[in-house]
Image: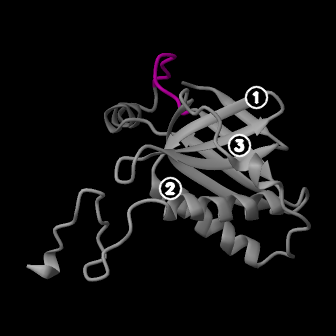
Amino acid sequence: MSAFYEFEEVDAFTTGAIGRPGERVFYLQARAGRQRLTVKCEKQQVGAIVQYLRRVLSDLPPADERPMASNLELTDPSESLFVLGPIGLGYDRSSDRLVVQLEEMVPADLADDESDDDTDVDDDEPTRGHIRLYVSRSQAVAFCDHAERVIAAGRPDCQWCGLPIDPDGHACPRMN
């Protein structure tokens, strides 16, 4: 895939998970007008985005207002554009927007093929899909609040070993 999408304004930037705890599949989703882009990702990637956005937001003035929480529900993520790989995050002072860049994960065997021969340009070689979003401070705050709830809705951690407790039980290594 070599698609590139850029949204200078989004109606919603959100995350969600489908499945039972321990087997959930996470998604990031951006909606602008009638266009909706969904990317499959890992829970840790969502957590990393939240952590970075919170750090940047702490250095900025408070958000003016928050979008409605109903705008943060994931809508039909059955068609994901790609699986998330590298994430780029930043802040654009001129537009007072946080920049979120999502790049497609390229399988390691294909990435190795690309780096072996940089002199030949092959039209068939894989290129990463990109999505670049500019989100307001209030959208970033709402995303972080919502994402933290989605992450916390998973398996609880064991109080003794810190590992997640499966719905079917937990063999705690500290409880022999």
Q: Secondary structure at mark 3?
A: strand
Residue toward you, 64 or 175: 175
Residue toward you, 154 or 112: 154
Identify the mark nearer the N-term, 2 or 3: 2
Q: How many marks?
A: 3
Q: CA distance from mark 1 to mark 2?
A: 23 Å
Across and down, in percent, residue 122 comes to 48, 19
Identify the mark nearer the N-term, 3 or 1: 1
Q: Secondary structure at mark 2?
A: helix
Q: Is residue 85 left or right of residue 64?
A: left
Q: Which residues are magenta?
A: 120-128
| Residue with the most extreme front position | 168
The residue that mark 1 highlights is 35
Mark 2 belongs to which amino acid?
Answer: Gln
Q: Secondary structure at mark 1?
A: strand
Q: Is residue 151 left or right of residue 95?
A: left
The residue that mark 3 highlights is 132
